[in-house]
Amino acid sequence: MTLHTLTITRAHDLLKAKTISSVELTQAVLDHIARMEPQVRAYLTVTPEHALAQAQAADTAIARGEVSPLTGIPLAIKDVICTHGIRTTCGSKILGNFVPPYDAFVMQQLNKMGAVMVGKLNMDEFAMGSTTEHSAFHPTSNPWNLAHIPGGSSGGSAAAVSADMCLAALGSDTGGSIRQPASHCGVVGLKPTYGRVSRFGLVAFASSLDQIGPLGKTVADCALLLQAVAGHDRADATCAPHSVPDYSVALGQTVKGLKIGIPQAHFESPGLDPKVADTVMRAVKVLEELGARTVAVELPHTQYGVAAYYVIAPCEASSNLARYDGVKYGLRDSAADQLLDMYHNTRSEGFGAEVQRRVLIGTYALSAGYYDAYYRKASQVRTLIMRDFQEAFAQCDLIASPVTPTPAPAIGAHSNDPLAMYMSDVYTLPANLAGIPGISVPCGLSADGLPIGLQLMASHFQEEKLLTVAHHFEQATEFHKARPPL
Amino acid sequence: MKITPEEVMHVAGLARLRLDSDRVDKVAQQLADILTYVDTLAQVDTQDVPPTAHATALTNAFREDQVRDHLRPEEALANAPAKEGLTFVVPKVIASS
């Protein structure tokens, strides 16, 4: 049996029935990582000893009859999430040697449930990027075509799930960083509502936008992982006190009668690949065949989402990243004999070009004389984008759109044009600005055999609707069964 | 939108970044391109529109003030690039003349 290809749901059944052990399953995943990693390079740190010790403990728990849905399941974690005693780099040289003295809230939850962590996944430095080329360590390849990017910033997470190098993964999404790589790698990725999952122990990028979420081989697996990490945490003041529903119930709900909003402008924008538009529209037809109704909705201000985001996110980043000063942890330039020189040298040496670019934009936009023109203006446009969604969700349950304008570009395609990379987030950013949940689910392949995703968005805390519709779409189609030709 | 090399150097200083002179022109051009695109926001009528700082309805998140376990000083110092006893060590703050 090729254990590494299992879903969480299937592996759980086999573990519970004692047909397989977690040690066998974990070893199979570790062996597959060793085979695939030279080509895919999804990981920054693989933790075989840690994983096998956790698997052993899981097998002991299972023998006692203590089986949670994640007991003994080998998962991998984006390297933006702090793991106690295990290096957490955020894809940056400045945190290259950082070993967190505590676990993120989501890790505490996974550990309580007996999950196994096989390693930490590659990402664009500080989650700033849409390609994973901006990792300070190495790029990651798309398992569907190694010459192409896996998307980003959770590119390692999407590539690892796609290539069966873990059963599922956690990522983070500030402007599309879960949904966009999920779309590019042919897996399911869910960005929860802002506040649904605690960010305690998530290295901060843009605090009004960042959210942790799951990437999996199926919608059901994402529901399980979301269930494990969602909920209130006193350590994150932005974490919502709302009770967490049983997401497995949502999978069984019907699609019939649900109204899917279609923002026509999102299917007609100039940069949109016609094949992507056509594939996503055919996916909408499938939803209609399943009993959903479509209604036209207008989101007139989402066309300004990229501009608003590339003010708000860099402003927040320039403030959040001020903490990397070479004093308390991480890299320090030890040659400097004065404090100010040490700051300058450490940060210039430790941050890559894209991070420096965004820190500079943010610092510029917040500097004296520019605040009203940039940050205040962008925050007002953000209000208008939120109102667009409120009005749209008064007429529909969900909104369908592409995830990305094109399938995954070749590695290096955007290397000299940051703005072109920013434009690839045009369909995903609005959900972050509005704080609403969104999911990417595989819906086809391009002529070149690269995956295309369908994005569904819902109103705040309506993850259940996303899971219902995405699950039924998945069950009615074969796209999620396609594997990369490795 | 144009940004001068001097402005870039000023902002880099505020951000505690050192830009080598051979990179300044390229960075100035990239920032100008991005900010020119961002200027499309000026097309939007935002008269009387309140700004949004974050997307949830939560306001103040109060909790009881309780004594709890925290990191021990040794743990908090474990990643320090330089330390002495239970303190972080930094280079001189004020240059000696």
Image (cartoon, coloured by chain):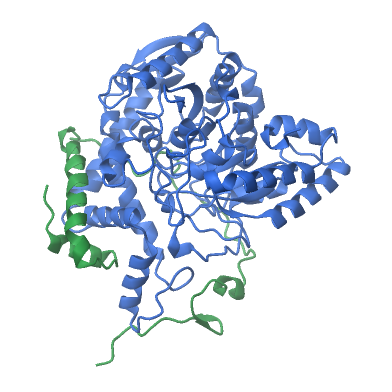
Horizontal side of residue A244 vs A381, given as left or right: right
Name the residue rendered at 62%, 51% in the picture.
A119
Task: List x then y, in percent, for residue A207.
Answer: 41, 49
Name the residue rendered at 29%, 66% in the picture.
B17
What is the quadrant of residue B24 in the picture?
bottom left
Quadrant where the C terminus of chain A lies? top right
Drawing shade for chain A: blue
Task: List x then y, in percent, for residue A272.
Answer: 31, 24
Q: Along the line of sight, which residue is nearer the eye, A256 or A177?
A: A177
Instruction: Looking at this view, name the residue that lies furthest to the bottom.
Output: B97
Task: List x then y, in percent, for residue A330.
Answer: 47, 68
Task: List x then y, in percent, for residue A335.
Answer: 38, 81
Horizontal side of residue A182 vs A428, given as left or right: right
What is the quadrant of residue A226 in the picture?
top right
Residue B51 appears in the rendering: no
Q: Along the line of sight, which residue is nearer the eye, B64 or A447?
A: A447
Quadrant where the N terminus of chain A lies? top right
How many numbered marks does the figure carry?
A: 0
Horizontal side of residue B40 vs A193, given as left or right: left
Q: Which chain is green?
A: B
What is the quadrant of residue A357 in the picture?
bottom left
Q: In the rendered view, would you say A373 is above or below A180?
A: below
Q: Along the line of sight, which residue is nearer the eye, A471 or A415?
A: A415
Horizontal side of residue A115 vs A201, given as left or right: right
Q: In the rendered view, would you say A179 is above or below A31?
A: above
Residue A452 appears in the rendering: yes
